[in-house]
Image (cartoon, helix red, strand yellow):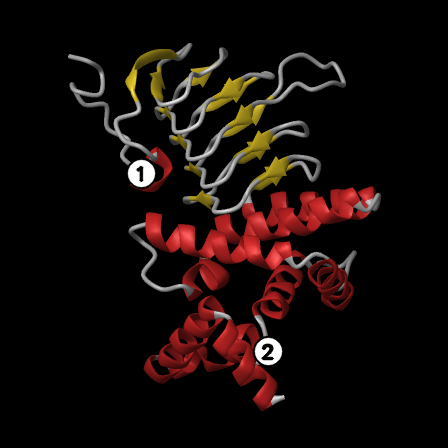
Amino acid sequence: MAERRAKLLELDPVWARINREAEEAVAKEPLLGGMLHYSILHHPSLDRALSYRVSLKLANQEMSEQILREICDEAYASEPDLAQAARADITATYERDPACHRYLQPLLFFKGFQAIQAYRVAHWLWQQGRRDLAYFFQMRSSEEFGVDIHPAARIGRGIMIDHAHSIVIGETAVVGNNVSMLHSVTLGGTGKEDADRHPKIGDNVLIGAGAKVLGNIKVGHCSRIAAGSVVLKEVPPCTTVAGVPAKIVGEAGCDQPSLEMDQLLRGETLGL
């Protein structure tokens, strides 16, 4: 087991870094030793650690941790891209969130990251036709993290959700790669028709706190949605929209807004 673990660490730099950070954390704070061993150091790979963390968080009296862990293990074994997406999410959080100083923080402490990983397992279940189990994951994630993502929604990798309170992402929503969003964001529908009714968010988009994007509309690549905006119409690529209802107020201000995380509306961005 030790030899296999060492080989996996050599092949997986993200997992190797998380392990180094966990060992350093145990040395600095021995009282967290049990948590760090059970959550990280005990596991041979990142996918096994993710299974443990997700099942621990979502377990309740109706569904035991052991059953949920078996479901998660099955998902990660069947779809290796789940763990690959998690690696991209960890890296995205570390690079974009100034409060994240170590790779282990999202895995242990950040509910935005944990909620996205729970969604990814739920989405896998949905694709397998196991929809009641997928709904259970959605329900528990909403109760535990305050993040309600329908398991049918399609979400890319490199996702960073900062603070992650009161996030709602609807059934037919699509979120591209390398998207950043803050708390209280809604990607919602309009009306009650059972059809394609939710937003389609492009790559490298930044969605500010409290923004509401409603209806089957496109938000173009590399655009910015200002905090508190209500978006009801299509957003062209590389633009900034703001207001209620949101209007184009200028260019995005940079090539990849989701990476820069710059939410200020400056004069040059607004064309002033």
Judged left or right of residue 48, residue 183 is left
The residue sitting at 73% across, 58% down in the picture is: 75
Q: Amino acid at mark 1?
A: Met
**Mark 2 nearby-residue class (10 Å; few <14, some 14–19, many ≥20):** some
Q: Outermost residue, front direction?
A: 11
- Is residue 35 in view? no
Judged left or right of residue 4, residue 269 is left
Image location of residue 224, percent across then percent down: 36, 26
The residue sitting at 56% across, 68% down in the picture is: 46
The residue sitting at 37% across, 77% down in the picture is: 25
Q: Which residue is mark 1?
A: 261
Q: Secondary structure at mark 1?
A: loop
Q: Which residue is mark 2?
A: 44
User: Looking at the image, how many numbered discs can be counted on the residues?
Assistant: 2
Q: Is residue 102 above or below residue 224?
A: below
**The label number, if any, that marks residue 230 in the structure image:** none
- Is residue 191 in view? yes
Viewer-side residue, 245 vs 177: 177
Viewer-side residue, 58 vs 101: 101
Q: Is residue 126 above or below residue 191?
A: below
Viewer-side residue, 28 vs 194: 194
The residue sitting at 33% across, 34% down in the picture is: 257
Image location of residue 104, percent across then percent down: 43, 66
Q: Is residue 87 above or below residue 196?
A: below
In the rendered view of the protein, which quadrant contains the N terminus? bottom right
Mark earlier in primary sequence (1, 2) = 2
